[in-house]
Image (tube, rainbow, N blue to C red):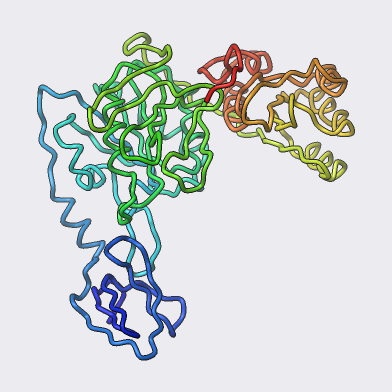
Amino acid sequence: MNPGDRVRVERAGVTNEGVLMPSSTPEHLVVKLDGGYNVGIAREDADVDVLESDVYDVEAAQSESAESEVAFDDDLPTISLISTGGTIASTVDYRTGAVTAQFDAEDVLRAVPDLAGRANYRGRVVANILSENMTPAVWKELADAVAEEIRAGADGVVVMHGTDTMQFSASALSYMLDTPVPIVFTGSQRSADRPSSDNVMNAVCAVEAAKADAAEVLVCMHASTSDDVCALHRGTRVRKNHTSRRDAFETVGAEPLGTVDYDAEAVEFRREYAERGAVELDVDTDLNEDVDLLKFTPGMDIDRHAELLRSAALDGLVVEGTGLGHVHTELIPTLEALVDDGVVVAMTSQCLEGRVCDRVYDTGRDLLDAGVVETGDTLPGTAKVKLMWALANLDDPAAAMARPIAGELQERSVPWT
């Protein structure tokens, strides 16, 4: 009896059947039920029957899938599937019990039969990592890969990505690429072995969005907890607001750019967007990585943080201030000294809605006098990525932080529900 075997376990009058998982303690068995959930069972007095050995052999499954081919249809658009890893491209390893990134883009295509007949597909792998391991170097590789696919004739690009840092990667590509076709990020909150997995619907809706007219960098994820509609979020205005819900992603400060009806296969846009073919492809992947994001909190050690900032050799700093964009007054001289040394210091807000305005209170006016730049309603994470790009590509990055480049800074901040 080994992990990966299908077993039936009877104990205390209760029968459980499923796949045997690794257990952290010798006193317990862990069985993954057919519904996707795990149950722990005390080994003592348990009657175990092995129904089938080595049910889940991941290496064999991958070897078999590698022999599959995807048919080409001249009447269908061509969509490039680019994989960076993440839950949407993951499987459960029944030797360890962990969810790990296993498949390349074409394996994901074969794992989602509903994608068949919607487009011609090309698949490539840029990275095979969990999204918490994402780096600016991978952003550059990803942008170059997307550009290559567009030059090769792709009518749209779908990027499969882990959800935890998807908003950062989507922001990065929003600045790095002027695109004539849609670039759609998608992922899944729950792995394919779970009955509540969102991978199929998200992948299908992402492909439909990549075939549509909005030539922007978008994030396509569940719009609600139901399997009916996906929301299309602009890459620079989206934020993951829940750890595990399928509708974790939200457009902050506005309604989503559009929606994809899963059953009707209909894409609808609610706001203005960049149209397909309106611009020529342009790529600027240079980034200045000497940029940091500082979250101000009451009670933080001002002297220690001031020393860290002075010794960090930064070219840019994004501050996540309170309310309208404030920090402790004792931190302002340090920020002013950074500005005097040529560091671009940009102010954002910890609030999820609204915008920075440092002209209301004395602290804000002091920050402006110190040379700190207001960023309107730009999200803090987006502001960091924007500043990395602006420092490497623009003559006046400080001025750029106060104006919109890729839809990250809205003209007005109004409540939306």
Task: Look at the picture and state if 23 lies above or below 191.
Answer: below
- Residue 181: where, in percent of width, then height? 32, 19
Task: Look at the picture and state if 94 lies above or below 260.
Answer: below
- How many numbered tags mark residues here? 0
- Considering depth in this image, is 200 or 278 the residue closer to the camera? 200
In the image as oriented, which residue stretches furthest toward the top?
278
- Residue 263: where, in percent of width, then height? 23, 32
Residue under the point 14% across and 32% down: 117
- Residue 271: where, in percent of width, then height? 43, 14
Residue under the point 18% across and 51% down: 66
Please state if 251 lies on the left or on the right of 28 as rendered: right
- Considering depth in this image, is 182 or 175 the residue closer to the camera? 182
Query: Which quadrant of the rendered structure holds the N terminus?
Result: bottom left
Quadrant position of residue 180: top left
Residue under the point 68% across and 33% down: 350
Task: Look at the picture and state if 327 lies above or below 277.
Answer: below
Residue under the point 34% across and 22% down: 182
Residue 126 appears anywhere in the view: no
- Residue 262: where, in percent of width, then height? 27, 32
Please state if 278 lies on the left or on the right of 309 as rendered: left
- Considering depth in this image, is 335 or 236 the residue closer to the camera? 236
Residue 330 appears anywhere in the view: yes
